Amino acid sequence: MFPRLLQIALINLSLGLSAMADTRVCSYVARLSERDHSASDGFRLKDAASIIRQDRANFHKFNRPDEEDESDNFFSSVRNREDLENLVKRRQLPAAVSAAIVRGTPLVQIEVIQSDAGYRYIRVTLL
């Protein structure tokens, strides 16, 4: 009898854990062009987090998207763009990803994830 109860408990635990999946808040693809490498005042940006944030400001605030930029439902807010920069800084991107963004104009996918534990994190993927 005990093994059957243990099996049921393990199945219930497994089902409960699969229901606790992280949720994607937003996802978009963007070309991080030369335009995104400069702040609004013309100052050259030197880190990946600032470049990614400027891309969204160029898209939402200045209405200057690059041809490959996709819209998102999250970063039209100044506050959320600030959060984006902080999320990227906290994530500590792999050196190769950061270098590709700072030194080049890569196509990237950005995903903002809300964990069941209540915190947000970001995924940056070079495409």
Image (cartoon, rainbow, N blue to C red):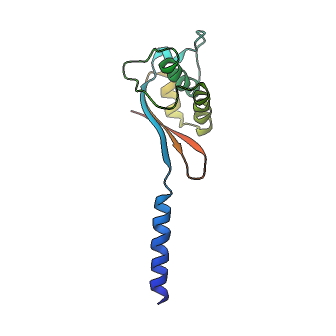
Give the percent coordinates (x, y) of residue 75: 52, 28
Which residue is rendered at x = 44% and y = 21% of the image? 105
Percent position (x, y) of residue 77? 56, 26
User: Can the viewer see residue 107 in this picture?
Assistant: no
Image location of residue 12, percent across then percent down: 47, 71
Identify the residue at image location x=46%, y=22%: 32
* Residue 87 image offset from top left, x and y in percent: 59, 36
Labels in figure, total: 0
Quadrant of the drawing holding the C terminus: top left
Residue at (61, 12) in percent of width and height:
43
Q: Quadrant of residue 72?
A: top left
Apparent side of residue 85 relative to residue 106 in the rendered image (left or right) = right
Is any atom of residue 19 visible in this view? yes
When the figure is inspected, residue 79 is found, relative to residue 21, above or below; the finding is: above
Up-down: is 33 above or below 89?
above
- Given residues 81 and 44, the one toward you in this image is 81
Q: Nearer the viewer, residue 26 or 37?
A: 26
